[in-house]
Image (cartoon, helix red, strand yellow):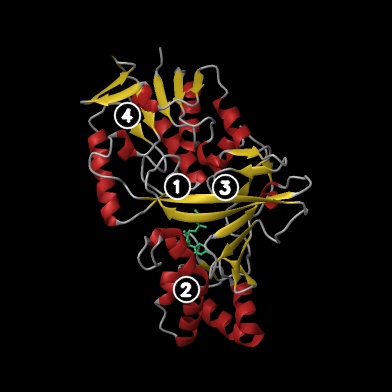
């Protein structure tokens, strides 16, 4: 009855479902355990009529033309360039830490000396990771590195990961560089913005195809079993494609043990004022238990009376009912554990792991869309007998 089954309707699941249906004329069943589609990109109007991101702020940005053009088939864009400031003991400095932040912290005279040194060392416009900056032997650059490490990265990272920046994967720390420029934007990508009518609408458009059937509030394990190298759909062998986007350890009932994740708790608050923050996101990098506060109206450009914000409280993921695994914790040990599960899965023909959870990766939206498109290319290629 179905050619392919997709488990999960987040970015990975929605894109691959659309591609299998549209490009390969496949009949696709999408199983979604939540009551709604869109995964963690899901947005909705709260009781005050403010469009919020239920699972924390998601801001689209990309240099990948294919991805931008692909998503543009399903949405128009609200032209939003994300800017973030860090609250450092009551003063607000641009993050990523850049030359504007530098002058704010050191004043014009010392700022000018430091700018010259940083530019001579790394080049105008460079993106330098804090770990790289910390290795610089120049005492004045070291002073800047120490300041940024202490006031931007250390406490935020301790809250977010429960570990210091030195302990976590370099790729994670490099996501937010030190910028040798006056560009206050959080991302420097060519295309950035928000789906004009929200993410949920964009995913609805994507999944709206005559060959796609979506079942929400449907746990995959209620219809699908993985047994001795054979996938069973309602007890019968199923040899079509299965694209699994959930946590891979769950799929095998934690056979090798649990894969560690970080979770988040969100606290939403509403105010009668038009806006309560100067920026879409303010990072709390030296104090507070939450890492950041997002005010959605900045992101979405929505014109509505009143405003809603959300505070993010990170925590260890225990797997208890209702908790969501948001971030894989990338280190050698965890990656090795993941590989064991991936190897276990490789005995199942036509089953593919796709997504942040299924691949145990830290994907941005655009990277995820690209991965899903590439998997579709691969499946299409195999179908045509192309290696
Ligand atoms: N980070 C930090 N201070 C900041 C912003 C980011 O220490 O003000 C670190 C922190 O470890 C965080 C990582 O950089 O987890 C990546 O930040 P990003 O904003 O990309 O995280 P995301 O939005 O994906 O949660």
Badge number at residue 351: 4
Q: Position of residue 87 (x, y in %)?
A: 61, 68
Q: Position of residue 175 (x, y in %)?
A: 47, 59
Label 2 beta carbon within 8 A of ligand 1: no
**Residue nearest the observer in this picture, 190 or 105:** 105
Task: Answer few, some or many: residues within 10 Å of disc 3's Cα (few below 14, many 20 plus, some between 14 and 19).
Answer: some
Would you name the residue on which mark 1 appears? 326
Task: Answer few, some or many: residues within 10 Å of disc 1's Cα (few below 14, many 20 plus, some between 14 and 19).
Answer: some
For the residues carrying marks 4 and 3, which lies nearer the camera in this image? Answer: 3
**Residue nearest the observer in this picture, 180 or 302:** 302
* Numbered disc 4: secondary structure: strand
For the residues carrying marks 1 and 2, which lies nearer the camera in this image? Answer: 1
Q: Position of residue 53 (x, y in %)?
A: 60, 44
Decide: is 52 above or below 93.
above
Q: CA distance from mark 3 to mark 1?
A: 12 Å
For the residues carrying marks 3 and 1, which lies nearer the camera in this image? Answer: 1
* Numbered disc 1: secondary structure: loop
Asked if labels 2 and 1 touch by Cβ distance under 8 angstroms, the answer is no
Task: Give the residue at x 26% y 40%.
Answer: 341
Mark 4 or 3, nearer chain start: 3
Task: Answer few, some or many: residues within 10 Å of disc 4's Cα (few below 14, many 20 plus, some between 14 and 19).
Answer: many
Badge number at residue 58: 3
Would you name the residue on which mark 2 appears? 149
Mark 2 or 4, nearer chain start: 2
Q: CA distance from mark 2 to mark 4?
A: 43 Å
């Amino acid at each position: 009855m179905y050619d392919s089954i997709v488990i999960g309707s987040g970015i990975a699941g929605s894109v691959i479902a659309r591609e299998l249906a549209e490009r390969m004329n496949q009949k696709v069943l999408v199983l979604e355990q939540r009551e709604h589609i869109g995964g963690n990109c899901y947005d909705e109007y709260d009781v005050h009529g403010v469009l919020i991101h239920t699972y924390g702020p998601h801001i689209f940005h990309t240099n990948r033309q294919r991805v931008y053009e692909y998503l543009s088939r399903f949405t128009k864009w609200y032209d939003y360039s994300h800017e973030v400031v860090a609250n450092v003991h009551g003063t607000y400095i641009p993050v990523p830490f850049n030359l504007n932040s530098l002058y704010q912290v050191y004043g014009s005279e010392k700022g000018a000396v430091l700018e010259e040194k940083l530019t001579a060392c790394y080049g105008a416009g460079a993106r330098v990771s804090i770990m790289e900056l910390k290795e610089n032997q120049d005492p004045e650059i070291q002073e800047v590195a120490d300041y940024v490490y202490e006031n931007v990265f250390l406490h935020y990272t301790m809250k977010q990961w429960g570990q210091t920046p030195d302990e976590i994967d370099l790729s994670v720390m490099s996501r937010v560089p030190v910028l040798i420029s006056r560009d206050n934007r959080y991302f420097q990508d060519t295309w950035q913005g928000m789906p004009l009518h929200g993410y949920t609408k964009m995913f609805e458009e994507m999944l709206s195809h005559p060959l796609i059937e979506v079942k929400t509030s449907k746990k995959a394990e209620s219809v699908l079993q993985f047994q001795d190298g054979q996938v069973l759909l309602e007890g019968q062998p199923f040899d079509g494609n299965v694209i699994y986007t959930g946590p891979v350890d769950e799929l095998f009932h934690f056979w090798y043990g649990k894969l560690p994740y970080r979770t988040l708790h969100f606290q939403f608050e509403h105010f009668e004022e038009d806006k309560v923050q100067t920026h879409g996101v303010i990072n709390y990098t030296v104090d507070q238990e939450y890492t950041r506060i997002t005010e959605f109206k900045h992101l979405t450009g929505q014109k509505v009376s009143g405003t809603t914000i959300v505070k993010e409280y990170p925590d260890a993921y225990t797997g208890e009912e209702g908790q969501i695994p948001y971030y894989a914790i990338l280190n050698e040990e965890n990656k090795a554990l993941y590989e064991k599960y991936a190897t276990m899965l490789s005995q199942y023909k036509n089953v593919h792991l796709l997504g942040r959870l299924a691949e145990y990766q830290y994907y941005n939206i655009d990277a995820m869309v690209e991965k899903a498109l590439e998997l579709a290319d691969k499946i299409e290629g195999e179908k045509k007998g192309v290696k």
